[in-house]
Amino acid sequence: MKENEKDLYYLQGLSIPETPAPGQEPKPWQKTETIGKRVPRVDAYERVSGAAVYPSDIVLPEMIYGAILRCPHPNALVKKLDISAAIEMPGVLAVVSGSDPEARLEWNYSKEIKTALFEPHCRFEGEPVAAVAAETPYQAWDALRAVNVQYEVLPFVADERDALKKNAPSVHAGGNLLKTEKYERGNVEKGFIDADVVLEENYRTQCELHTPLELHGCVAQWNGDRLTLWESTQGVYAVQEKVAEVLGMPLSKVRVIGRYMGGGFGSKLQAGKYTIIAALLAKKAARPVKLFLTREETYLAVGNRPPNDMRLKAGVKKDGTLTALDFCCTGTGGAYPSGGTSLVDWLIRDLYKCPNVRTECTDVYIHAGPARPFRAPGHPQAAWALEQMMDALAKAIHMDPVELRLKNIPDFSQAKEGNPPYTTTGLRQCLEEGARAFGWEEARKKSAPSSGAGHIKRGVGMASCLWFVGGGWPPSTVILKLFSDGSMNLNMGASDIGTGTKTVMALVAAEELGIRPEMIEIEHADTGTTQYATPSGGSKTVPTEAPTVRAAAISIKQQLLEMAAKDLQEEVVALSFKDGNVYSTKEPSKKIRIADISGLKKRGVIVGVGYRGPNPENKSINPFAAQFCEVEVNTKTGEVKILRFLGTNDSGRVMDRLTYDSQVIGGITMGIGLAMTEYRVLDRNQTGKMLNRNWHDYKLPTAMDVPDDIVSLPIELVDTQANTTGAKGLGEPVTIPTAPAIANAVYHATGIRITETPISPGKLIRLLAESRKEG
C-alpha cells in the first residue's frame, strides 16, 4: 500500500460515536455520516453485471438434473405406479417414489397434519408423485413422461365458499373446517346502538401468487454422509433444520448456502419437498443434482396469498368517533394447514381506536396448493375491507377520509395482551404530512366526479395501515473482524432477499467505526461458515441484525481503546476516536493511528461478537404507513390508469435512503398487482385445475401499469426504545394499503365501489352500466 493511501480506509473529518463501557447500552446516534444517506448497494456491480452467483446459477462437476412428476388432479389416489420404463430411458441415473424405502419419509404441515413425502392421496394438483434425475433436463422430463401412474380420481372442492356446504367433498377425514378463531372486546351491540351511522358490506380478495423471478429449487451434493445444499431461500438455517429433521440427520451434517436469492416474498422462508427430493436423488445417483421447479410448478405447489371472503359492519358517530367494528372472514390455505385466515383480522382489532370490536375467522380446506406467507400475511386483505369501509363512513357523515382516520388514532395496542403502548406512533404524521405533500385537499376538489362532462374521470384515494410486527427479535449473532490495515470482515447468517440487507449492515459497521463501507467484506447466509440467524421475513431483518452488527462494532472499539490506552499511557475513559485515530480527550495532540496500535499489529485481527438483545418489555413495536394515489378512469372501457402514488412510512430511522425508496416503490408495485391484475383461476365446477399457471395468463403488473410518479416520504421518528439503531421494519407495510387506496380513488372518480379484487376493466364497465340503468 502506498504511503498516501494508508488512511483511505477511514472516513475523514468526523467523530465516531461515543463508545459505551462494557455492559452499558450505547446512546442513540445523533448526526450520522453514512446511515440515512443514498448509498449504492455494496454488491451492486455483481448484481447488475451478472457476476453474482445465485443458487440457480450453480454448476458442479458431474452435476445432473432433477424433475418431479406431479399429480394432474386436485383430488386423487395413486393406485399403481410403474417406473420401470423411466429407469430405462436414456441418461436416467436415479428415480425415486414412495415405493423406495429411503423415500418413505414424513412431511409435517403441522403437529396435527402429517403426510408422506410422496403422499399416495394427492389432495391438490401438483402434489409430488415421483422424481427423476438424468444427465440433462430434457432427459429428466422425458423420463417423467414414461412413468405410468394409475389414479382414482375423486370429487373435489376448489373454492372456500363451497367447502362448508352440505355434501361438499372432504379434503381430510374430519371434514373441511380447519378452525374458527374469535376475538371480542367491549359490547359490539351497544356500540352499534350508540352510532349515528351503521354500514355493512361484503368484500373479497382473490388468491394471489408469489411468482419470484428466481424459481424455487436447489442443488444438492453429498460428500460421504455430509449434505450440502445451494438453495434459493430466505433463511439458510430454517432450511437446514427442516432437512435435518426430515432426513434424520444431525444439523452439523447439513450445510445450506444461499448468498443470493432472486425474490421470495415469503414463499422461500422454508424448505420445500423439492429440497428433500433433490437430496434423495443426489444420494441415489451418487452425483450432485440440480432441481429447480418450472414456472408452472411454482404456481401450484409453493405458496400463495390466500383468498378471503369478508363481511364488515361498522358504526360511527357524526363527530367521527368509531363505536363498533364487527368482522367475519372465511379463507383457505389450501389442502393443508397454512394460514388461510392468519392475521386477516389484525387491522380490525388494532389499527383504529375503537372500544367495541368483534372478529370471527374461519379457515377451511380446499383441494388446492398450500399457502405460504406472502408479504404482510393477512393485512392487505383486511385493509381492502377496512380502508374502503372507512371511506364509506367518512362519506356518510360528510367528513374528509383523512380527517376520519386522524380522529381514531390509538397510542397503544388495543389487541395485544396488556394493551402495551407503541414505542413510536407515526400514523398521524403519515396522514398529515402525506396529505400535505400529495396536495390532498386540492386534488380531491379537482378530481370530484361532478367535474367535467367527458368519459375520462379522475379520482384520488388513500388508505393507511400498521404492520403486526416489525421490531425484530433475538436471536442473532454477528462477528466482525478488524484487520491490521483497517479493513473489515462482517460475518452474519441472515439472507439478503433483495432488500439491501448487506448494504445496511455495512453502513452500520461503517458508522460505528468510521470505516469506509467499501472496505467491509461480507460473508452471509451459509450455515457452514456464518452465524445463526432466523429467516429474513416479517420485516425483521434490519431491526434484528443492525443492532447486532452495532454491538459487534462496539466490542471492537472497546478492545481498541484498551490497547491504545497502553500505547498512549492513558485511561480508557479519556480516549476517543476520530479520523482513523485514537486520541486523548484531555490532550488531543496525543494520538495513535488505529493501524499502528501495537495490540492490533501483534494480533493481526480483532474480533468483535455481537448479540441481539431482547425487545423492551410491555411495549409494542409497529411500523405505520399511509398512501395516497390519483387515478384516471375511462368510463367507456372500464380501464383504470394510475397516475401517481405517494407513500409515507413510519419505519423508524432511515438506514439507507436509496434502498428505503426502492422498498417503497416495490411494495406499491406489488399492491397494484393485488388491486388491478392478479388472481388465481381454479376451474371451480369441472376439473378443479388451475387455468392460468403462467406469466401470460397470470397478469403481473408491468411498467405500463405502474406510474412513474411514485414518491417515498419517510416519517423518520427514530425509535430509541425499539433497538439501538432506531429502525423498524419497512418491507411489509408498503404493500398493505395500496389496493384499498386505489379502490377508494376509483370510487371517488366513478361512484362505483369495487368490493372484489381485481379491479378489472370488464368488472368495472359492467358495474358502470348497471349504475346507469339504476340511475
Image (cartoon, rainbow, N blue to C red):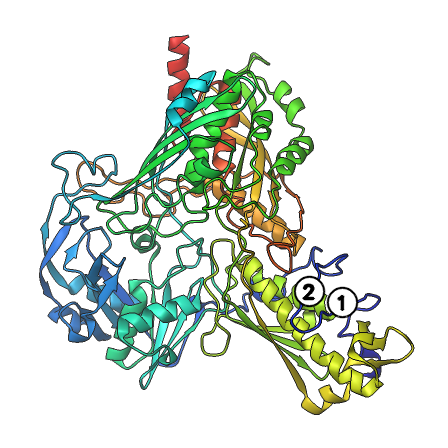
Q: Quadrant of the C terminus?
A: top left
Callout 1: 10 Å neighbours few (<14), some, many (20+)? some
Q: Residue furthest bottom?
A: 602
Q: Is residue 762 above or below residue 36?
A: above
Q: Is residue 646 above or below residue 249?
A: above
User: Residue 121 or 649: which is nearer the viewer?
Assistant: 649
Q: Quadrant of residue 87?
A: bottom left
Picture coordinates of residue 729, whole percent (x, y): 55, 52
Tell me the number on the disc at residue 18.
1
The three-letter code of the residue at mark 1 reads Glu
> Which residue, given by chain and number where applicable, does mark 2 sit on?
26
Earlier along the polypeptide chain: callout 2 or callout 1? 1
Residue drawn at the location 46% of the way across and 45% of the way down: 416
Which secondary structure lies at badge 2? loop
In this rendering, position of residue 629 left or right of residue 417: right
Is residue 444 visible from the viewing direction of this image? yes
Picture coordinates of residue 751, whole percent (x, y): 48, 18
